[in-house]
Every structure is written in structure tokens, then in C-alpha cells.
Amino acid sequence: MTTASLNPSFLSAVTLLGGEGVLHAKPRVVMDWIPLVRQGLPSASIDAVVRLTRLTQTELAHALAIPERTLARRKREGALSPEESAKLVRFARTVERAETVFEDADTALNWLQTPKASLGGVTPLSLLDTDIGADSVLDTLGRIEHGVFA
């Protein structure tokens, strides 16, 4: 495993998604996530994200563009679909990236929930339901990290 193959946001996303105990795996490189997403993450990952971000399940459902009733059903079934799993991993990666940039979980979560002019006046959290929106949030975080304020 080379340093170039490591992606810190993926590694820290493990914790946000419930850790090795919930995932029954410890992804170490980007490619390790693919089989986990394809088989569907355990539904306990939802509870872990809610607990660690202090978002409500309703807020999380909205951020993922997954109906809250669907999340409740998945919790009963025990696993998310591959598509829902991909959305949850994208969400976790973005939250962890914000925590890295701001070096504080509370500051990161506050930033994600506050409207930003550079993002069209909407909250970063509201953009995480699409790849393009998440890319825009990650780009904005990169600019903040490098001192380029937009």
C-alpha cells in the first residue's frame, strides 16, 4: 500500500459510519469501499452518523435525498441499497473533510448547516444529495483550506 493510495477522508469516514464493528470491514484504500457500497452498508451506519453528527434522522434523510420512511424501512431490513450506501459514504467523506479543514467537529457541522454565498446562498448540507453538489462543497472546502475565500 503506497501513501498515494490512501485517502484520509475515506479512512476517517469509517469512524463516522460506525467503525469496523458496524461495517464488518476496515477500508484502507479507496478501492476497499467499492464492495462495501455494492453489497449495501449495514443500516446501523445510519444510527452512527446521526449520533456522531448530532443531526436528526430527518435532517440526514433530507441531506441524502432518501425519504425518511425508506431509511426507517432499511433499518428494519438491516442494510441500505447500493445507491443509498453511496450517498451515505459521500456524506461521511464530506463531513470528515470539513472536520479536517476546520480542525473541529462542531465548527465543521456548523459550517455545513449555514448558507454560503459561494454556494448560491444554500447550505453545504443541502447540496450533498448530488455528486455535483458534493463536488462544489469539497471545492469550497479546498479553497478555504488554501486561504482562497470565495
Image (spheres, helix red, strand yellow):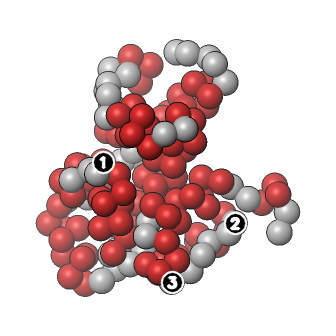
Q: Is 139 situated left or right of 123 in this image?
A: right
Q: Is residue 131 left or right of residue 9?
A: left
Picture disc at residue 24: 3
Q: Secondary structure at mark 3?
A: loop
Q: Position of residue 57 (x, y in %)?
A: 21, 58
Query: Residue 13's spot in the image, x, y percent?
Result: 52, 59
- Which residue position holds label 2? 29
Amino acid type shown at disc 1: Ala
Residue 36 visible (yes or no): yes
Q: Residues within 10 Å of mark 2 (few under 14, many from 20)?
A: some
In the displayed structure, would residue 124 be above or below residue 31? above
Q: Secondary structure at mark 1?
A: helix
Rendered residue at 50%/64% (across/down): 15
Instruction: Bin the neighbour count of mark 1 within 10 Å (Cα to Cα): few under 14, some 14-19, many 20 and up.
Output: some
Residue 150: mark:
none
Q: Nearer the viewer, residue 23 or 87?
A: 23
- Mark 1–mark 3 Cα distance, whole angstroms, equals 25 Å
Q: Which mark is residue 63?
A: 1
Up-down: is 15 above or below 59? below
- x, y (%) of residue 26? 60, 75
Label 1 vs 2, first from the N-terminus: 2
Residue at image point 44% right, 43% down: 105
Q: Which mark is first along the chain, 3 or 1? A: 3
Question: Does the image show residue 134?
Answer: no
